[in-house]
Image: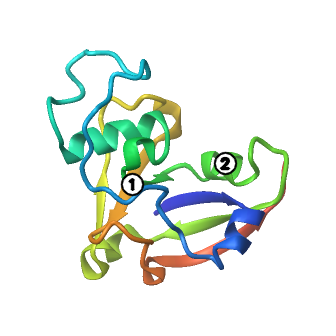
C-alpha cells in the first residue's frame, strides 16, 4: 500500500482529486543551484530527470510526478502540514496501477531516505485515477 498525505484545505479545494503540480513527463535539469552534478541527473530531457527533480521539490521544472510513501506516519506528517492542521491520507493500491495507467518510480538513493518516497504519475500526466484510491482517512495533528 502507498499513502499520500494532503492537508484538508488542499483536499477540499480539489474535491479529493490528486493532481500533479506540473504537466511534463520529462524535464531538463537547469543550473539553478538546487542540485549537484553527481551523475544522478542525465544530460538533456528525460523521465529520470523528472523523478529526480520531483524529489528536490514537487513539480520542479514542471514535472508531473506525485509523492507517495510506504510509511503511513510520513503521510500523516505531510497531511497535517508539519502537525499544524487537519488533513487526509489517501490509501493507494499499487496493484491497480497497470489497470488504470499509473506509473511508479522508486529510487534506491532517495534524497530523504526516511520518507520512503515513491513517485507516481498517470500515463497522461494528469490527476491520479480515483479508482486506485481505496480509502481516505481524516487525520489531525498529533
Measured as percent of width and height from the top left, residue 26 is found at 24, 49
Return the residue nearer the eye: 23 or 42: 23
Q: Nearer the viewer, mark 1 or mark 2?
A: 1
For residue 52, above or below residue 120:
above
Who's the residue at 48% across and 30% down the image?
A: 112
Question: What is the total number of numbered labels drawn onto the structure image?
Answer: 2
Measured as percent of width and height from the top left, residue 128 is found at 43, 72
Mark 1 vs 2: CB contact within 8 A: no
In the rendered view, does 85 fall on the left or right side of 49?
A: right
In the rendered view, does 52 fall on the left or right side of 141?
A: left
In the rendered view, does 25 fall on the left or right side of 16?
A: left
Find residue 105 and name its label.
Answer: none
In the rendered view, does 33 fall on the left or right side of 107?
A: right
Measured as percent of width and height from the top left, residue 48 is found at 23, 42
**What residue is shown with label 1?**
65
For residue 36, above or below residue 23:
above
For residue 67, above or below residue 45:
below
Picture quadrant of residue 100: bottom left
Return the residue nearer the eye: 5 or 41: 41
Circle 2 packing at 10 Å, graded few (<14), some (14-19), many (20+), is: some
The single residue placed furthest to the left in the displayed view is 43
Numbered disc 1: secondary structure: loop
Who's the residue at 38% across and 21% down the image?
A: 35
* Colour setup of the view: rainbow
Who's the residue at 32% across and 29% down the image?
A: 30
Measured as percent of width and height from the top left, residue 120 is found at 37, 58
Q: Earlier in the sequence, mark 1 or mark 2?
A: 1
Circle 1 packing at 10 Å, graded few (<14), some (14-19), many (20+), is: many
Picture quadrant of residue 135: bottom right
**What residue is shown with label 2?**
78
Numbered disc 2: secondary structure: helix
Return the residue nearer the eye: 123 or 59: 59
Amino acid at each position: 500500500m502507498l499513502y499520500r498525505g494532503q492537508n484538508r484545505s488542499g483536499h477540499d479545494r480539489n474535491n479529493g482529486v490528486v493532481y500533479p503540480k506540473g504537466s511534463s513527463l520529462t524535464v531538463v535539469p537547469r543550473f539553478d543551484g538546487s542540485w549537484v552534478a553527481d551523475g544522478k541527473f542525465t544530460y538533456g530531457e528525460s523521465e529520470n530527470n523528472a523523478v529526480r527533480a520531483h524529489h528536490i521539490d514537487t513539480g520542479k521544472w514542471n514535472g508531473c510526478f506525485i509523492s507517495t510513501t510506504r510509511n503511513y506516519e510520513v503521510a500523516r506528517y505531510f497531511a497535517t502540514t508539519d502537525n499544524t492542521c487537519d488533513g487526509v491520507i489517501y490509501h493507494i493500491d499499487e496493484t491497480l496501477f497497470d489497470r488504470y495507467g499509473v506509473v511508479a518510480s522508486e529510487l534506491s538513493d532517495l534524497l530523504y531516505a526516511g520518507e520512503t518516497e515513491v513517485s507516481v504519475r498517470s500515463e497522461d500526466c494528469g490527476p491520479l485515477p480515483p479508482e486506485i484510491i481505496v480509502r481516505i482517512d481524516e487525520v489531525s495533528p498529533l
